[in-house]
Amino acid sequence: MLDFLKKFRIFFGIMTVFSIIIIFLFYQALKPKKTLPIFNPADVNPELVDSTVQYVQKYHTIADFRFTNQNGKTVTQKDYEGKIYVADFFFTTCGSICPIMTTNMVDVQKAFANNPKVMLLSHTVFPENDSVPVLKAYAIKKGVNDKKWNLVTGDKKAIYTMARKSYLAVKLGKPSEIYDMVHTENFVLVDQKRRVRGFYDGTKKAEIQRLIDDVNWLLTQE
């Protein structure tokens, strides 16, 4: 018996390796391929979408924009052209979810610190209070990298329009006050073609990891 095993040990070794390879290839073939949805206004909670675009079911992209960042620089869609980016809405005096969201956005910033293909964009929903100097002080306090992350302010109507017609991520405030906004905890993932690819709870670490994983996946799709 021992002589038999010795005689055929090379054969058995080769068959074992071959079997492992076959099993691995079958697993790879059968394993579901990762995909990310492309979100349109009709796919999202209507509370977060302006009524004028709620019917849109395909071809939705982020509109052109023009805001001012924490350094007083004009920021437009050109600064994000061909980039993957994460957008959100906040205000500097928010004492509830905003500090948590900002801390978690810093984690996203760290995850892609050396990758110029990934950027961040935070919009204030209170531009009347969040002036350029206020945003700059907030950015310094929170550790914002100016080359990767823009905190922007501007015309409230324009921010409202982007929030509810492009990013599909902000609720209405007081019905009596035009363009009043209540930001949510949503982080919005935008791909290189300006399409919305995901929504994430910016207050939860598990969601932030999912966001980072999805950004990494998008980076492989170029």
Image (cartoon, rainbow, N blue to C red):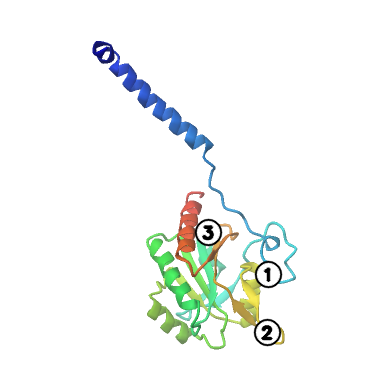
Three-letter code for the amino acid on which mark 3 is drawn? Gly
Of the pair 20 and 129, the residue shown nearer to us = 20
Instruction: Tell me which label, 3 or 1, sits earlier in the chain.
Output: 1
Of the pair 216 and 96, the residue shown nearer to us = 96
What mark, if any, has residue 123 been given in the picture? Answer: none
Give the spatial CA distance, label 1 vs label 2. Answer: 16 Å
The residue identified by callout 1 is 49
What mark, if any, has residue 82 been given in the picture? Answer: 3
Q: Is residue 127 above or below residue 203?
A: below
User: Considering the numbered disc 3 on the image, is that residue within a helix, a strand or a loop?
Assistant: loop
Three-letter code for the amino acid on which mark 1 is drawn? Val
Give the spatial CA distance, label 2 vs label 3. Answer: 36 Å
Q: Is residue 93 above or below residue 83?
A: below
Instruction: Tell me which label, 1 or 2, sits earlier in the chain.
Output: 1
Q: Nearer the viewer, mark 3 or mark 1?
A: 1
Q: How many marks?
A: 3
Give the spatial CA distance, label 3 vs label 1. Answer: 25 Å
User: Considering the numbered disc 1 on the image, is that residue within a helix, a strand or a loop?
Assistant: loop
Residue at left 41%, top 59%? 115
Q: Is residue 218 above or below residue 152?
A: above
| Quarter in which the N terminus is drawn | top left
Instruction: Tell me which label, 2 or 3, sits earlier in the chain.
Output: 3
